[in-house]
Amino acid sequence: EAQVTQNPRYLITVTGKKLTVTCSQNMNHEYMSWYRQDPGLGLRQIYYSMNVEVTDKGDVPEGYKVSRKEKRNFPLILESPSPNQTSLYFCASSLSPPRGYGYTFGSGTRLTVV
Amino acid sequence: GEDVEQSLFLSVREGDSSVINCTYTDSSSTYLYWYKQEPGAGLQLLTYIFSNMDMKQDQRLTVLLNKKDKHLSLRIADTQTGDSAIYFCAESSRDDKIIFGKGTRLHILP
């Protein structure tokens, strides 16, 4: 089944403890992206990648890192999480820049930083 | 910059038609999208329309595009309880990004 898989689905962590949220897609998509979803703010793009070893900042990149060493994986790294990073995170992928194709989204990771 | 606006809530009686509206700012948008988010799930692409089209119909879904007014709507005919979700309007921006609205929560009344 074609899908984007994120892990974990739920995570509670403490301020300052490094964490990684994994994202993997099995559709050979070139374009991958991370979003966070917050009440009243909708979806905001954190980082995106147009291909292997090519990553760019989105609208809210502060406090996050990403890497794209392989086409299928696009992990999101929080080196020193803070409470304002408590949010619902989505990974998404697309065949190309998603203009004509739209995104396939993962099921989300709900992160709580205390 | 580019922006997508939509109302936050809509309540509709089961069996009636739902119409969710959206306005966008980027006149160069080539694609406009509707995504559906069910509770506890990611966004799912429902449909999209190319900017040179006025209307697109897919079973119970009808998308209308008024490019002059930069207005997009999604009509769901014969609304069912399974249609209860958040619906996101989105546009493709000139730098190949997708700009999402804040989402409209559709509530179905019995």
Image (spheres, rainbow, N blue to C red):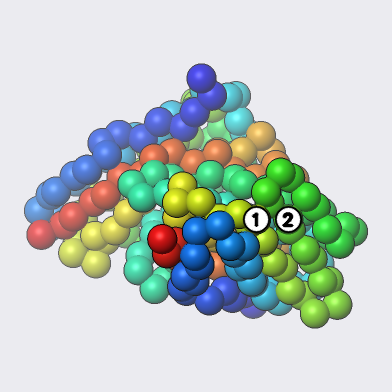
Where residue A40 appears, as percent x and y from the top left, is 39, 73
User: For the point 62% across and 62% down, which residue is it?
Assistant: B17
Residue under label 1, please give it: B77
Contact between labelled residues 1 and 2, with CB atoms less than 8 Å apart: yes
Q: How many marks?
A: 2
| Residue B99 visible at all | no
| Residue A3 visible at all | yes
Q: Nearer the viewer, residue A53 or B18?
A: B18
Classify residue B27 by image quadrant: bottom right
Kind of residue sitting beneath label 2: Thr
Where residue A8 appears, as percent x and y from the top left, is 26, 36
Classify residue A71 by image quadrant: top right
Which dot marks residue B62?
A: 2
Q: Secondary structure at mark 2?
A: strand
Q: Is residue B89 left or right of residue A39?
A: right
Q: Quadrant of the N terminus of chain B?
A: bottom right
Q: Is residue B88 left or right of residue A5?
A: right
Q: Secondary structure at mark 1?
A: loop
Where residue A38 appears, as percent x and y from the top left, is 35, 65
User: For the point 24% across and 67% down, which residue is it?
Assistant: A84
